[in-house]
Structure formats: C-alpha cells, structure tokens
C-alpha cells in the first residue's frame, strides 16, 4: 500500500476507470461502438471551431494569453456582464473543483442532491467538508424545500445541478428564487448549468440576475455539451468579481488549453448557427426517443438535457451489458439507486434509431429469458 495519501482521499469513492471504446471493441470482438454513456455531443466539433483549433497548433509553444482574455470578453458580452465576472477552467469539472478549493475547509458542510453529478460529493470530501445528501423526490425532482431543511450555520456550499444529471429534471425557477433568499451569509449556491442550452429557456432561473443582486450565487457552464467540445476541456463560471478573483488566486494560471480556447472562441463567434441547428435536431430526437421508449413499455422522464432518462421493465445493468455486447454504451443508473433506470445520451439521428432498435431486441431477449 502506498504511503502519504491525504487522509480525506480515503473518504472518497475510489476511482475506477471505465472501459474505453477501444477496449470494448477488443473485448467484445466489435468493429464499431456507439458511445452514448457520457453525454457527449456526437455532431461536434463544429466546422469553424475545428478550423480555428487546427490553426492554433503552430502556437502551442506559447501560453494561451490572447484567447484566454478574448474568451472571457466574449462570454461577458453574451451574459451582459463585465469580463472580470467570468473565469475559465479545464472543463466545468475543473471549475467545480477550484470552487471547492476556494470555499471549503475542514468542518464545513455541503448539501448535494443524492441522485446527481458525483463530482460534487468527492471534491467536497477531499476538502474536508461533510456531505449532506438530499434525495430527489419520487418524481425524480430536486425539491428546494428539502434542501432548506438541512441548511445549517455550517453549510458553505449548496451544489445544484440544473438540469440535473442523470434525471434531466429542472427545478422550478420560483423555487430557486425562494431558496436564494434562504441562504445563510457564508453559504454559496453553485448552479451547475452544464446542460442549460438543451432546456426550454423560460424554465431556467436568471442566474446572472442573482449575481447582479449581490446574492451568493455562482453559475457554471461548459463547452462540452451544447458546443460539442468535450475533448477541448473548456468550462467557465460567472460570479461576483471579488469571488472570481479569489477563484483565480486559488487555481493555477492558464488553467485552460490553447486549442480548446481557440475552439471555444470560434464557436461563439462563427459557429452559433451550427450549435443551434444541431441542438434543435437533438431536442427533436429526445422527444422521438421518449415516444418510442414509451411505446416499448418504458417510463420516460421529460428530460431537459441532451439525454433521455427512463425506467425499463428489466434490471438496468442486464440491459446495459447486453447492449454493450452489441457495441452500444449507455449508462445504467443503479449507482444512483435507480436499478431499473437507464440514461442514454442523444446521439446522431442514425445512432438514436440504431439504439432503439437494439434496445427493442434486448427487451425481447430478456422477456424470453424471463419466460423460460
Ligand atoms: C452536471 C455536470 N457538470 C459538469 C460536468 C463536467 O463537464 P466538463 O466536460 O466541462 O468538465 C458534467 C459532465 O458530464 C456534468 O454532467
């Protein structure tokens, strides 16, 4: 056993790497794999971003100063704030991590939705915070009243995923308005809006308004989902400039890479049409999948993200394993306590149709097995 590991690391769920696409192909003797388990955007990277990133390669010997500043300016313009209200990170995951580093210390408490993005829990534990988990309702929704019940004078962060991963649910914005007013003085509400662009915009809270009103709120977004740049690793936060300065103090300098930054700037300046077009296609496919899945006997939640979330008549691990053998990677949700639920990222229309076809065949296989 290696020595010297930080004691809080022992509290964290041990990291186990998932199978790569290459490993799945090798292990199951497949020639192709459809990976719809990580909520990536299968239409990206978009044209202009690709071009800008290719052009950037020759400058990789230089730190990414120019686009680091430019991207913040573009995002500031988009959200109607000054550029010192924005900071960047190596993906939203890194932004979340640096926020935990900025705010948390031993003895603090954080509140997390139990069935949500795992990272909130782990990055809080490593900083020595006590994690208070609040279960979603039986309608798979986050209830802010349940969160308010566990607020204490030790609560430093409330992590909120909106739309939520893995359910795709959105908290009614009036509930967030109400909750923001309940926040104790030293407590911050972090609204992770990684999937916001796929939601009906009128359902989302005005996160920037809270910040402008001086509330302890931080908004987080990413280029990984809507913008199709998961491999470019660019995420960002919007917050009060003083908080942003503390975030920058705690995180490493230039915590975003030159290629990703060039791609992100091009996406905002030149690829908006592609982003919108493919988002509409994915949203239409989300509804098409929900309709077909319902016809197949599944119970679908009306997800507002780039994935569908549904319960099947069978054990989700069994379904996922059979799909894997056919080269389709999906996310069974047993780890969240949803043993019959599956999350499937929206792929290209062709991939979505293939997944539905294979899922139908899998259900048939399992039903025949049950009848034996
Ligand atoms: C809710 C949520 N937040 C953050 C992230 C991390 O995104 P990024 O690729 O920008 O690190 C993910 C990734 O799946 C996510 O689901």
Image: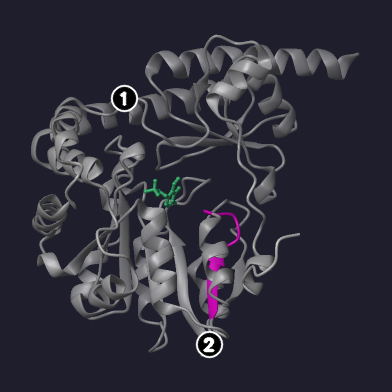
Choose the circle earlier in sequence order: 1 or 2: 1
Which residue carries the number 1 mark?
Answer: 43
Q: Percent x, y for residue 322? A: 70, 20
What are the residue bounds of the magenta stretch?
109-117
Residue at figure coordinates x 55%, y 22% from the top left: 22
- Find the distance from the CA under tag 1 to the CA under tag 2: 44 Å
Give the image quarter of residue 300.
Answer: top right
Q: Which element is circle 2 on?
A: loop
Residue at figure coordinates x 60%, y 72% from the top left: 131
Q: Percent x, y for residue 30? A: 60, 11
Visible residue check, residue 318: yes
Whether residue 114 appears in magenta in the rendering, the answer is yes
In the foreground, 196 or 251: 251
Give the image quarter of residue 132.
Answer: bottom right
Residue at figure coordinates x 33%, y 45% from the top left: 233
Where 363 sits versus 85, above or below?
A: above
Q: How crowded is mark 1: few (under 14 residues within 10 Å), some or many (20 or more)?
A: some
Where 19 sits versus 144, above or below?
A: above
Whether residue 163 appears in magenta in the rendering, the answer is no
Give the image quarter of residue 219.
Answer: bottom left
Visible residue check, residue 213: no
Please state, as top left, top right, bottom left or bottom right, where the C terminus lies in the image.
top right
In the foreground, 18 or 59: 59
Which color scheme did the rendering employ for the protein? one colour
Q: Percent x, y for residue 140? A: 57, 51
Which residue carries the number 2 mark?
Answer: 154
Q: Which element is circle 1 on?
A: loop
Q: Percent x, y for residue 367? A: 78, 17
In the foreground, 162 or 65: 65
Q: How crowded is mark 2: few (under 14 residues within 10 Å), some or many (20 or more)?
A: some
Relative to residue 171, is residue 120 drawn left or right?
A: right
Where 302 sits versus 246, above or below?
A: above
């Amino acid at each position: 056993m290696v020595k010297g590991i930080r004691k809080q690391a022992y509290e964290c769920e041990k990291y186990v790497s998932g199978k790569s696409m290459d490993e799945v192909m090798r292990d199951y003797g497949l020639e192709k794999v459809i990976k719809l388990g990580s909520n990536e955007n299968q239409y990206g990277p978009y044209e202009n971003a690709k071009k800008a990133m290719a052009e950037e390669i020759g400058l990789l010997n230089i730190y990414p100063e120019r686009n680091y500043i430019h991207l913040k300016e573009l995002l500031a313009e988009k959200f109607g704030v000054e550029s010192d209200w924005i900071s960047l990170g190596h993906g939203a995951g890194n932004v979340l991590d640096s926020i935990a580093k900025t705010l948390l210390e031993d003895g603090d408490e954080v509140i997390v939705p139990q069935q949500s993005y795992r990272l909130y829990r782990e990055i809080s534990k490593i900083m020595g915070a006590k994690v208070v988990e609040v279960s979603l309702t039986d309608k798979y929704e986050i209830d802010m009243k349940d969160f308010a019940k566990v607020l204490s004078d030790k609560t430093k962060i409330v992590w909120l995923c909106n739309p939520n991963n893995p359910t795709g649910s959105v908290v009614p914005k009036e509930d967030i308005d109400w909750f923001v007013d309940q926040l104790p003085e030293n407590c911050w509400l972090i609204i992770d809006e990684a999937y916001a662009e796929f939601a009906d915009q009128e359902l989302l809270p005005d996160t920037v308004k809270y910040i402008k009103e001086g509330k302890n709120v931080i908004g987080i977004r990413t280029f990984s989902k809507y913008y199709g740049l998961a491999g470019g690793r660019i995420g960002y936060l919007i917050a009060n400039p003083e908080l942003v300065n503390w975030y920058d103090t705690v995180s490493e300098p230039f915590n975003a890479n030159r290629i990703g930054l060039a791609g992100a700037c091009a996406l905002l300046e030149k690829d908006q049409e592609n982003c919108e077009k493919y988002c509409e296609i994915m949203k239409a496919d989300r509804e098409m999948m929900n309709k077909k899945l319902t016809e197949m006997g599944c119970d679908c939640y009306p997800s507002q993200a780039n994935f569908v979330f549904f319960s099947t008549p069978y054990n989700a691990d069994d379904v996922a394993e059979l799909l894997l053998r056919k080269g389709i990677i999906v996310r069974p949700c047993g780890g969240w306590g949803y043993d019959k639920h599956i999350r499937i990222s929206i792929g290209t229309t062709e991939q979505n149709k293939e997944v539905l076809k294979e899922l139908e065949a899998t259900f048939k296989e399992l039903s025949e097995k049950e009848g034996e």
